[in-house]
């Protein structure tokens, strides 16, 4: 990012500027970068809307970051973060409060575990699009219409890919303005050349606390390190993630692979199942990750499984 003033959003686009705020490092860094430009006098860097899509399953630390950033946005730009979520009152469709509830009820895993990104589309992209552009069932006016924008106007969506995470080809593509039938897209971190480390530094310089990666607690993309942290800091969510996996294995559809990590990793033998990994991985304390989480949560996984799905899991013996 240049220190000299240049317009972030020269008047080439008529629509509003909307930040897709995921609650993690990258999108928080976009807001920090925009704030720097705005304070330097560039009014075009002020977002018109900051949108967070809530799956209902983020870690508490992410919800805390959303709350904190929302306060900071209000003080900085005069607008808080707006939360969009999937409606659970569509006639003729079963409503779920969260993606994890959807998984437990239907005895399945997030579709990311099957190699498809439909969970992200359904629980993140669709709610944000519906909030902006409106929806037919149930009929709801979109934010654009409510704000008086002309029909067909395309908002400029700012997306948080940092300059290191994209492959070379994608990075080149993401340094340009993209467009589809309803939105324009920009990737400010790629334009500014901000790597993940630079994003973290910018957030710290702004005086905002450290931000963790945002993702559903049972996201198949969680790493071993992230699971260890979750088992220790959020043991009830950790056990709920294992329960989702066990229910999917024993449920009506069954699983053709091991679990949330799909298959055993050839390089180091890491199991494809979070339950197997948590049972086998022993901590310095001499007890497994699973037993540690159960101790911290104050109940056992088999007790939780019986509560969630008594038809699948027998009452645990004391
Ligand atoms: S964070 Fe993971 S589980 Fe949640 S919606 Fe995205 S891909 Fe799916």
Image (tube, rainbow, N blue to C red):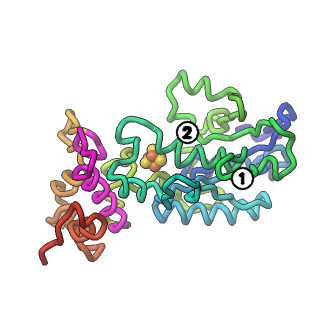
Observer-nearest of 140 and 286: 140
Query: 266 or 100: which is nearer to us?
Result: 100
The secondary structure type at the circle numbered 1 is loop
Circle 2 sits on which residue? 195
> How far apart in space, not on screen, are marks 1 and 2 (Cα)?
39 Å
Q: Which mark is residue 140?
A: 1
Q: Residue furthest top?
A: 169
Asked if residue 81 is among those painted magenta in the image, a careful observer would answer no
**Residue 271 visible:** yes
Question: Which residue: 55% across, 66% down?
Answer: 64
Residue 237, compared with residue 195, is above or below; it is below
Question: Is 247 covered by the magenta stretch?
Answer: yes
Name the residue nearer the viewer: 161 or 164: 161
Instruction: Kindly give the residue lying farthest to the front in the view shown.
Output: 92
Where is 95 relative to 273, above or below?
Answer: below
Of residues 59 and 153, the one drawn nearer to the viewer in this rendering: 153
């Amino acid at each position: 990012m240049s220190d000299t003033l240049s317009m972030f959003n020269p008047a080439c686009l008529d629509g509003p500027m909307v930040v897709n705020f995921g609650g993690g490092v990258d999108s928080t860094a976009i807001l920090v970068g925009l704030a720097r430009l705005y304070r330097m006098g560039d009014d075009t860097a002020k977002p018109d809307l900051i949108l967070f899509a809530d799956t209902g399953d983020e870690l508490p630390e992410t919800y805390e970051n959303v709350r904190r950033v929302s306060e900071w946005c209000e003080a900085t730009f005069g607008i808080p973060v707006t939360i969009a979520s999937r409606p659970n009152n569509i006639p003729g469709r079963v409503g779920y409060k969260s993606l994890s509830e959807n998984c437990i009820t239907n005895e399945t895993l997030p579709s990311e575990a099957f190699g498809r990104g439909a969970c992200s589309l359904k629980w993140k992209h669709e709610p944000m699009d519906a909030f902006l552009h409106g929806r037919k069932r149930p009929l709801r006016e979109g934010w654009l219409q409510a704000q008086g924008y002309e029909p067909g106007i395309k908002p400029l969506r700012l997306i948080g890919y940092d300059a290191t995470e994209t492959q070379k080809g994608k990075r080149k593509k993401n340094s340009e303005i993209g467009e589809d039938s309803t939105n324009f897209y920009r990737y400010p971190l790629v334009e500014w050349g901000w790597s993940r480390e630079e994003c973290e530094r910018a957030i710290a310089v702004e005086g905002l606390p450290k931000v963790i990666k945002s993702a559903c607690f049972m996201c198949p993309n969680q790493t071993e390190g992230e699971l260890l942290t979750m088992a220790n800091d959020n043991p009830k969510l950790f056990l709920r993630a294992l329960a989702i996996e066990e229910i999917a294995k024993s449920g009506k559809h069954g699983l053709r692979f091991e679990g949330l990590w799909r298959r055993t990793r050839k390089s180091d033998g890491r199991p494809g199942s979070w339950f197997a990994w948590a049972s086998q991985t022993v901590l310095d304390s001499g007890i497994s990750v699973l037993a540690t989480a159960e101790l911290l949560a104050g109940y056992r996984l088999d007790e939780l499984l019986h509560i969630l799905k008594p038809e699948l899991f027998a009452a645990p013996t004391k």
